[in-house]
Image (cartoon, rainbow, N blue to C red):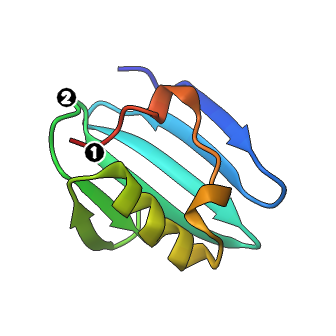
Amino acid sequence: MSEDATTAESDSVTATYRETDTERLLVFRHDGSEAAIAQNIEGYAMLKVRDGADGDELERYYGFDMALDHAGELLGVASHDLPVPEAAADMGM
């Protein structure tokens, strides 16, 4: 798989999406904090919310909206303020 990243930005949040050999990874950054949503590379497993790209897994979700809500909470922003690169829009089950 590709290590090429795509990004999206809102007023105060930057999102980076990339694929590794084992997972799809969406990382949000805001005011020095980081939250990540990861899914297996096949794209059918539950989403893992972490406190960073390589951070500890905090929770698993079936739905992308729920994972975005949790990521937003970690960053102190509303989930609708999280930019999502087009390549990551189909994450979740």
Residue at position x 22%, y 65% from top? 60
Q: Position of residue 83 (x, y in %)?
A: 64, 47
Q: Which residue is mark 2?
A: 42
Residue 46 spot, x, y in % from top left: 18, 51
- The image shows residue 28 at horizontal and vertical percentages of 59, 57
> Vertically, is 70 above or below 7?
below
Please name whichever residue, 56 or 84, is drawn nearer the observer in this view of the structure: 84
Q: Work out whether residue 53 can be spotted.
A: no
What residue lies at 67% left-to-right and 58% top-to-bottom? 81
Count of residue discs: 2
Vertical placement of 21 versus 91: above or below?
above
Which quadrant is home to the C terminus? top left
Asked if residue 93 lies left or right of residue 64, the reply is left
Q: Residue furthest right?
A: 11
Q: Secondary structure at mark 1?
A: strand
Residue 38 shows in the view: yes
Position of residue 40 measured from the top left corner of the image (x, y, whole percent): 22, 40
Label 1, on which residue? 39
Query: 10 Å neighbourhood of mark 2: few (<14), some, or many (≥20)?
Result: few
Residue 76 in the figure: left or right of residue 61: right
Q: Amino acid at mark 1?
A: Gln
**Dot 2 lies on which element?**
loop
* Badge 2 amino acid: Glu
Callout 1 crowding tier (Cα within 10 Å): few <14, some 14–19, many ≥20: many
Task: Give how far apart the Cα atoms at labels 1 and 2 are.
Answer: 8 Å
Q: Is residue 91 left or right of residue 80?
A: left
What residue sits 46% from the left and 59% below the top?
68
Residue 50 falls in image quadrant:
bottom left
Q: Is residue 2 above or below residue 29?
A: above
